[in-house]
Image (tube, rainbow, N blue to C red):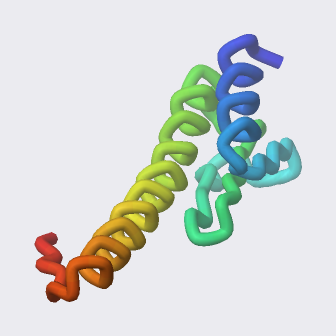
Amino acid sequence: MNIYLKRLMQYAWDNGISCVLTDKMNEYTPSSAKPENKIILINLNWYNQSEIVFQMAHEIGHVVNFMMKESCTILVLATSQATNEMPILKH
């Protein structure tokens, strides 16, 4: 296994993200993430092997982005409750 893939997997595990790596999928089935469950699926059978590390980083990014949005929402709601103000949420 590639050293970069190992490092990304360690980063994911350190941040509570589960990784499923499989070579049982079709070579054109893309890797994916389910951010709300903190899990990523990496297709090790991808037709362009040099893209797998990038795909893993990309899928981890989806989960981390979701986790950050979740944290910000909790902070906004907690702050508004502490100050008895309505939160102003902008997208």
Residue 86 is drawn in which quadrant? Answer: bottom left
Residue 34 is drawn in which quadrant? Answer: bottom right
What x and y, as percent, mark residue 84? 21, 87
What x and y, as percent, mark residue 70? 44, 67
Q: Say which residue appears at 66% left-offset and 28% top-offset.
A: 8
In the displayed structure, 10 sits above or below 42; it is above
Say left or right for 33 vs 87: right
Q: Say which residue appears at 46% left-offset and 61% top-offset.
A: 66
What x and y, as percent, mark residue 7? 70, 20
User: Which of the two residues, 10 or 82, is positioned nearer the viewer here?
Assistant: 82
Q: Residue furthest front?
A: 83
Q: Say which residue appears at 75% left-offset and 15% top-offset.
A: 2
Quarter holding the N terminus is top right
User: Which of the two residues, 1 or 69, is positioned nearer the viewer here?
Assistant: 69
Q: Say which residue appears at 43% left-offset and 62% top-offset.
A: 71
In the displayed structure, 66 sits above or below 81; it is above
User: Which of the two residues, 65 or 84, is positioned nearer the viewer here?
Assistant: 84
Say left or right for 16 vs 84: right
Quarter holding the C terminus is bottom left
